[in-house]
Amino acid sequence: MNAATGYGETIRLEIEAGVATLTLNRPDRLNSFNDQMHGEMRAALAQVKAGRADASVRVLLITGAGRGFCAGQDLSDRSVAAGGEAPDLGASVEKNYKPLVTTLRKLDLPVICAVNGVAAGAGANLALACDMVFAARSASFIQAFCKLGLIPDTGGTWILPRLLGPARAMGLSMLGDKLSAEQAEAWGLIWKCVDDDALMPTVQALAAQMAKGPTFGFAQTKKAIWASSTNDFDTQLDLERDMMRDCGRSHDYREGVAAFMEKRVPEFKGS
């Protein structure tokens, strides 16, 4: 299936061969979020969910236009004049950033992120909320919240200590130091750092490969791994049992076994 859906100036969504490519598209503002962009992002993700239901979308790829991935919140979008009433930042988190990352985490398909430049603040944690993160060698991750007297939102206080441990999470969050893509890979914060000119070809090839794979099993794996952070060992074993039962009843499992026995390439359907 080939499709292109526009949600205005701030988000591009293209669907082809089972891969939905969602591009943050405010390059003149380093793809920082404003209210319009949040609304268009919600609409795009709703279409991705609908595409998963009818099997036209099997993998989601998120990247940014221009020289940056996402600089977080566009501060000019909610600037306050001197002496004015302070904005309710908690309301913004509840309305925009919380549903954004929870939607990504709950999507019943793999979510791949291609970080093509700076990922700062909410932009960094948006990337880290994806299932697999690739970054260009020139890219960087910055927990910029401390520069404004804020805390890491968009799941940052949950994700960072689990991926890096409390010492590194504290240092990044309280100092706001720039973390290079190479260091992010070495620390286990992202999956891979690749040369700039290889980023999109690498990620697009992987997305196309995964879209042809057993995406029902991928979705179950995603759910199980994310659940493990709050489950005890016995609960996780019970979850594995139940998910293995569901996978064993799937078309993809039957097709995978048949293809193996017949020494042919499997034709998975994601169900």
Image: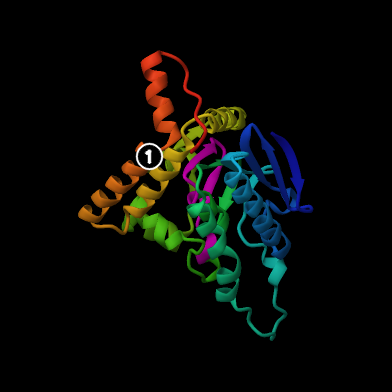
Q: Identify which residue, 16 or 172, lies in the foreground.
A: 16
Q: Position of residue 203 (x, y in %)?
A: 56, 32
What residue do we see at 43% from left, 56% from top?
172
Quadrant housing the N terminus: top right
Q: Position of residue 199 (x, y in %)?
A: 58, 32
Compared across the picture, whether 187 is left or right of 182 comes to left
User: Is 74 rendered above or below residue 181?
Assistant: below
Callout 1: SS: helix
Compared across the picture, whether 223 is left or right of 46 comes to left
Q: To which residue does mark 1 refer?
A: 247
* Mark 1 closeness class: few <14, some 14–19, many ≥20 residues within 10 Å: some
Q: Amino acid at mark 1?
A: Cys
Q: Position of residue 141 (x, y in %)?
A: 51, 49
| Display coloring | rainbow
> Which stretch is magenta?
128-146
**Residue 159 sits in which quadrant?**
bottom left
Q: Identify which residue, 111 or 114, lies in the foreground.
A: 111
What residue do we see at 57% from left, 59% from top?
100
Asked if residue 171 can be seen in this view, the reply is: no
Residue found farthest to the left: 234
Asked if residue 79 can be seen in this view, the reply is: yes
Per the image, is 131 magenta? yes
What residue do we see at 61% from left, 36% from top?
19
**Residue 77 sits in which quadrant?**
bottom right
Q: Position of residue 97 (x, y in %)?
A: 57, 63
Per the image, is 124 magenta? no
What residue do we see at 25% from left, 51% from top?
238
